[in-house]
């Protein structure tokens, strides 16, 4: 099934408040002890106290800049594909993917994420459920439009939620 949740809070709040200080500390430690990951790469970390979460996979992307639209859209696609690949390697059957922000237009974010998820799932058929999450009504509306385009509206479910809803 393919669904998406309209979050009432930012995703950083989900990770840093609901998941506990451990997540924030892991991020700081990673930045101090590792080389900076390149755009399109992913970094996997433990979920802290998010009890129903196996891992958090951070996809590395750059800030949206006019004039680099195609490159940045391709990087977002690659980062999404790579995070899904890491999810498969970690034997995860359910994944939640959040919208981007960083100045990316909502329509570009939604179309790119949905296309990457669709193409990955078509090729690998690894996931039982894929959840797209965002706090912006605009992004959620674009998710709905693009998911309907790719999978058909009858296979979609929409949920309003709070941070703990994606972890229970």
Image (cartoon, helix red, strand yellow):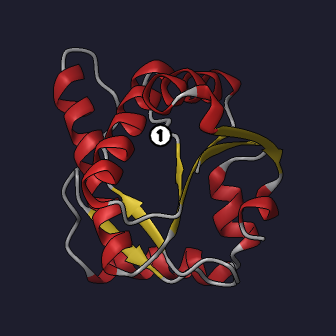
Give the residue displayed 38% in from the left and 66% down from the top. 126
Q: Where is residue 27 in the image (x, y as percent from the top left)?
A: 46, 74
x and y, in percent, of residue 166 in the image: 72, 61
Depicted 60 relative to depicted 76: above or below: below
- Residue annotated with mark 1: 100
| Lateral position of residue 148 relative to residue 64, left or right | right
- Picture residue at 67% right of the left edge, 30% below the top: 136
Q: Residues within 10 Å of mark 1 (few under 14, many from 20)?
A: many
* Image location of residue 21, percent across then percent down: 67, 80
Question: Horizontally, is 77 left or right of 38 in the view?
Answer: right
Q: In this view, does 43 lie above or below 155?
A: below
Front in this rendered view, residue 7 or 18: 7
Q: Which residue does the image show at 34% across and 72% down from the upper left?
A: 88
Residue 117, position in %: x, y? 38, 46
Query: Residue 139, relative to residue 40: is it above or below?
Result: above
Q: Can residue 31 be seen in this view?
A: no
Secondary element at image label 1: loop
User: Is 103 placed above or below 102 here?
Assistant: above
């Amino acid at each position: 099934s393919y669904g998406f949740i309209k979050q009432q809070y930012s995703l950083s709040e989900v990770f840093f408040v609901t998941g506990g200080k451990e997540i924030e500390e892991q991020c700081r430690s990673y930045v101090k002890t590792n080389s900076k990951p390149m755009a399109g790469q992913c970094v996997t970390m433990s979920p802290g106290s998010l009890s129903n979460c196996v891992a958090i996979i951070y996809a590395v992307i750059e800030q949206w800049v006019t004039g680099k639209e195609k490159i940045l859209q391709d990087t977002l696609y690659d980062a999404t594909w790579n995070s899904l690949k890491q999810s498969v390697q970690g034997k995860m059957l359910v994944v939640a993917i959040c919208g981007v922000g960083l100045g990316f237009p909502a329509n570009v974010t939604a179309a790119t994420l949905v296309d990457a998820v669709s193409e990955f799932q078509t090729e690998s058929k690894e996931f039982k459920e894929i959840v797209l999450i965002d706090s912006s009504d605009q992004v959620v509306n674009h998710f709905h439009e693009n998911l309907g385009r790719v999978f058909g509206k009858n296979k979609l479910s929409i949920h309003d939620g709070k941070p703990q809803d994606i972890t229970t």
